[in-house]
Image (spheres, rainbow, N blue to C red):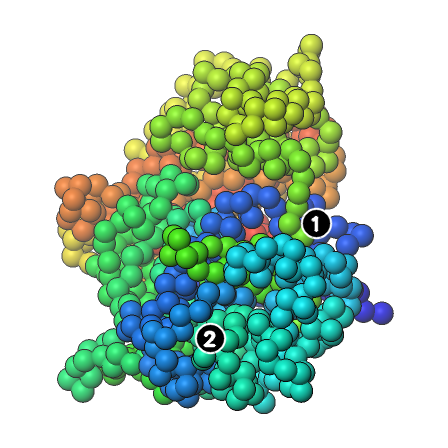
């Protein structure tokens, strides 16, 4: 029997066993979807789903307050500005001629009335397609994908249900419509008691033949008495709620609207995104292409507050045959500001506002040349979709093969105009990609002449598509539940004091304390652990932080309740601590001296070229090298020899595994200027993680202690602004990361002794990871996680 709702999305867990089933890409090469719901080890997110509510998808108070609402307002302001320009015939509306040509939502009858729609209130009932995506800082953020791929109407009407076939109470639904009409048209409450008498009618959509799944059915039951009847006198109809194209309205209704005798909800021009004929054609090759027309209106937005908006538009690659771009297709945006996870920005800062450098779009997407990439760049083509001016897909980056990438490079190199959008895959639960079809409900504030959000309880629904066999007409449907937990609502209202701190830091601090017990499966937190969760000035203790909450809240009484709630989850101080197992060995001067000497030996000894790309073959690098071979392999052998010696000294040769985990470095683009990469492709070298598996009493569990034994390229030797000359030279690595390598090395004999005495509760794995630093970009940690999830970890043992 099929599972209902979200349970159907995890029904085939575990689906990832076996080699190649759970690939993890470098974020710099391909930003994958965030995976939500059920983790590979079976851990369920306690905040996303509830067992008793299979139709629900939970949205936290923080997501709604800090991302969704401010993001919706920003989108509403941009769309509203465009709609006002469109209605007045101004070119600044930003909707291309190609989108308006033959568009049933903006026929000549409307276009010719530019500047004459004096009665228009510009009501938007605009269904957006939203999903959470990952950025290069590892943050998972709500993102605008564009206009709903489910058509212009379904999200609005699905808002009046809370599960499949389960409608909201009729009076509650009618109150939503009353609030919408009252706010948009400044109507008194008494006039809206009987919506039919107030003149509201509903005219259902007739979906186009190309998109039968855009149909609104089933409409909620309360709409029956409000349905428009062509036989009734038109004088009794003042407001018509319809998503039908203006060109398909009965002539009498068209005439009444144009003569200011009838209000249409929504503004008919706001639906042009679903009538853009070129994207109907593109949708046959890129299934989510109907999201794109609206996305073009929104400017790129990467700041942590609000909705993330990926860049989209058109790029022009000039050649003799294509010297100038055609302006009829959309916004020309052929420059791009790169971001990367090594950027020196705080989590709350807008990286785009801090970066002035813009690169040519074709270089950003396809160039693998060393000068263009710098230390932290990679071609970004895997996270973009590209199409031609005749609206044929050239590249669907997230699913592209190496051959398809090469074909796209060749097509763009020939020159011309190309449409594109950066496409970071939507959140996934199992094999299903999940999108929130949320209505953007707004009108034009006549006083401020800006968009004003309305009816924010119209939340739409979510659609989950099986990525193995994508079928837009047949998604699993879920309904959003905006959480309303009192302590978390209080946390949202907290203000942060102190220059340079995130304005949401105190909210985040409170959230960490509130969430931790549930995530850890315990009722109380130790005082020291609770304090360590706080990002607060060092001089501020836990009690001080708690006592300051009332003053940091917009409502002091609410702050006091939150303080009491948080204090209740902190356990009393323990009178005594357990006897330490390792401290007597590590607290000695001899251990400290050995630690620093080990770091010095690793960083200042014979191992110099310790980046996976070494040795880089360009002239700035070559002229500085003391030798022309990579030292990672000898360093790895040195570490393995050290552990074999320690294991033998402990008399545990037959019980402890010492070996490596070899693999090849694979990428989508060629980096022939990197010696290490080149040797991998030629089969002359492999990359490898190193492992020491020390047994504990429970062999079914392991604690992993890991470092990375490669080192980064030095910015001050590369960047001209820091005195560098473009040379890629590996750092000595004393603090990054030989300090950790030394800790693992000196910890090994201690763990071996604990294991020999039977004091280790579970296994301890000491793992030296390779390829953490750029350009390999978390190569070793990605490979380790892939193997653990897929269940194909294979250790090559050494003698």
Q: Nearer the viewer, residue 430 or 688?
A: 430
Quarter of the image holding residue 521? top right
* Quadrant for the N terminus in the image: bottom right
Q: Are marks 1 and 2 in contact (CB under 8 Å)?
A: no
Q: Is residue 754 above or below residue 423?
A: above
Q: Is residue 666 left or right of residue 572?
A: left
Q: Is residue 797 above or below residue 431?
A: above
The disc label shown at residue 485, or none: none
Q: Single out the mark in the foreground, 1 or 2.
A: 2
- Which residue is rendered at x = 26% and y = 64% of the image? 335
Q: Position of residue 347 (x, y in %)?
A: 41, 41
Q: CA distance from mark 1 to mark 2?
A: 55 Å
Quarter of the image holding residue 56? bottom right
Label 1 crowd bin: few (<14), some (14–19), many (20+), radius 10 Å: some
Q: Is residue 537 above or below residue 236?
A: above
- Which residue is rendered at x = 66% and y = 83% of the image? 232
- Which residue is rendered at x = 66% and y = 35% of the image? 486
Location of mark 2 (residue): 260
What SS does tag 1 mark? loop
- Which residue is rendered at x = 50% and y = 65% of the image? 124
How many labels were placed on the picture?
A: 2
Q: Position of residue 150 (x, y in %)?
A: 58, 74
Q: Position of residue 370 (x, y in %)?
A: 24, 60
Location of mark 1 (residue): 44
- Of all residues, the one furthest to the top in this rendering is 575
Q: Nearer the viewer, residue 255 or 415?
A: 255
Q: Nearer the viewer, residue 799 or 307?
A: 307
């Amino acid at each position: 029997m099929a599972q209902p709702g979200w349970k159907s999305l995890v029904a085939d867990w575990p689906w990832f066993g076996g080699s190649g089933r759970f690939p993890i890409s470098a974020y710099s090469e391909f930003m994958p979807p965030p995976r939500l719901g059920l983790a590979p080890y079976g851990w369920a997110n306690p905040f996303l789903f509830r067992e008793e509510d299979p139709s629900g998808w939970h949205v936290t108070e923080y997501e709604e307050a800090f991302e969704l609402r401010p993001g919706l307002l920003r989108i509403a302001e941009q769309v509203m500005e465009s709609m006002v320009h469109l209605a007045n015939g101004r070119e600044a509306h930003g909707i291309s001629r190609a989108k308006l040509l033959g568009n049933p939502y903006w026929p000549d009858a409307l276009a010719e009335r530019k500047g004459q729609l004096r009665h228009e209130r510009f009501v938007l009932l605009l269904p957006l397609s939203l999903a959470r995506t990952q950025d290069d800082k590892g943050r998972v953020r709500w993102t605008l994908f564009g206009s709903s791929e489910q058509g212009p109407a379904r999200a609005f009407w699905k808002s009046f249900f809370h599960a499949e076939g389960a409608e909201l109470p009729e009076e509650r639904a009618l109150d939503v419509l009353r609030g919408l009409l009252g706010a948009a048209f400044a109507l008194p409450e008494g006039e809206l008691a009987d919506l039919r008498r107030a003149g509201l009618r509903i005219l259902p959509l007739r979906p186009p033949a190309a998109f039968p799944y855009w149909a609104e059915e089933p409409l909620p039951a309360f709409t029956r008495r409000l349905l428009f009847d062509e036989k009734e006198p038109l004088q009794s109809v003042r407001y018509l709620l319809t998503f039908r194209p203006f060109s398909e309205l009965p002539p009498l209704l068209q005439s009444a609207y144009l003569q200011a005798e009838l209000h249409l909800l929504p503004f008919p021009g706001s639906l042009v995104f679903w009538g853009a004929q070129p994207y109907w054609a593109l949708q046959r090759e890129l299934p989510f292409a109907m999201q794109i027309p609206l996305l073009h209106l929104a400017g790129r937005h990467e700041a942590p507050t609000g909705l993330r908006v990926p860049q989209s538009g058109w790029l022009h690659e000039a050649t003799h045959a294509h010297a100038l771009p055609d302006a009829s297709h959309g916004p020309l945006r052929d420059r791009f500001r790169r971001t990367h996870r090594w950027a020196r920005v705080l989590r709350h800062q807008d990286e785009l506002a801090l970066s002035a450098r813009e690169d040519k779009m074709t270089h950003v997407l396809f160039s693998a040349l060393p000068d263009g990439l710098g230390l932290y760049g990679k071609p970004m083509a895997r996270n973009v979709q590209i199409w031609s001016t005749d609206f044929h897909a050239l590249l669907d980056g997230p699913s592209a093969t190496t051959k398809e990438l090469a074909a796209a490079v060749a097509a763009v190199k020939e020159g011309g105009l190309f449409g594109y959008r950066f496409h970071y895959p939507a959140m996934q639960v199992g094999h299903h990609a999940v999108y929130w079809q949320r209505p953007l409900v707004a009108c034009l504030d006549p006083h401020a002449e800006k968009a004003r959000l309305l009816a924010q309880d119209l939340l739409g629904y979510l659609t989950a598509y099986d990525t193995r066999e994508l079928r837009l007409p047949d998604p699993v449907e879920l309904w959003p539940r905006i959480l309303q937990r009192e302590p978390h609502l209080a946390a949202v209202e907290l203000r942060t004091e102190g220059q340079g701190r995130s304005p949401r830091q105190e909210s985040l601090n409170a959230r960490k304390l509130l969430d931790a017990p549930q995530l850890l499966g315990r009722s109380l937190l130790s005082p020291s652990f609770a304090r360590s969760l706080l990002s607060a000035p060092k001089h501020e203790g836990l009690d001080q932080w708690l006592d300051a909450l009332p003053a940091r809240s917009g409502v002091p009484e609410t702050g006091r309740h939150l303080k009491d709630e948080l204090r209740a989850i902190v356990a009393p101080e323990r009178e005594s601590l357990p006897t330490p197992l390792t401290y007597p060995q590590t607290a000695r001067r001899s251990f400290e001296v050995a630690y620093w000497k080990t770091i010095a030996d690793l960083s200042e000894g014979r191992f110099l070229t310790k980046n996976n790309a070494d040795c880089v073959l360009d002239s700035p690098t070559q002229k500085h090298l003391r030798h022309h071979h990579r030292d990672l392999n000898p360093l790895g052998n040195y570490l393995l020899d050290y552990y074999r010696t320690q294991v033998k000294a402990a008399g545990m040769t037959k019980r402890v595994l010492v070996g490596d985990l070899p693999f090849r470095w694979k990428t989508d683009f060629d980096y022939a200027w990197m010696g290490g990469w080149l040797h991998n492709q030629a089969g002359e070298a492999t990359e490898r993680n190193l492992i020491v598996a020390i047994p504990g009493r429970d062999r079914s569990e392991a604690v992993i202690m890991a470092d990375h034994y490669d080192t980064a390229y030095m910015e001050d030797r590369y960047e001209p602004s820091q005195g560098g000359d473009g040379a890629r030279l590996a750092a000595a690595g004393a603090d990054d990361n030989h300090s950790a390598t030394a800790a693992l090395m000196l910890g090994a004999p201690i763990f071996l002794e604990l294991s020999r005495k039977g004091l280790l509760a579970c296994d301890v794995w000491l793992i030296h990871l390779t390829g953490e630093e750029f350009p390999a970009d978390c190569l070793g940690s990605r490979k380790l996680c892939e193997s653990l999830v897929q269940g194909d970890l294979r250790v090559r043992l050494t003698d």
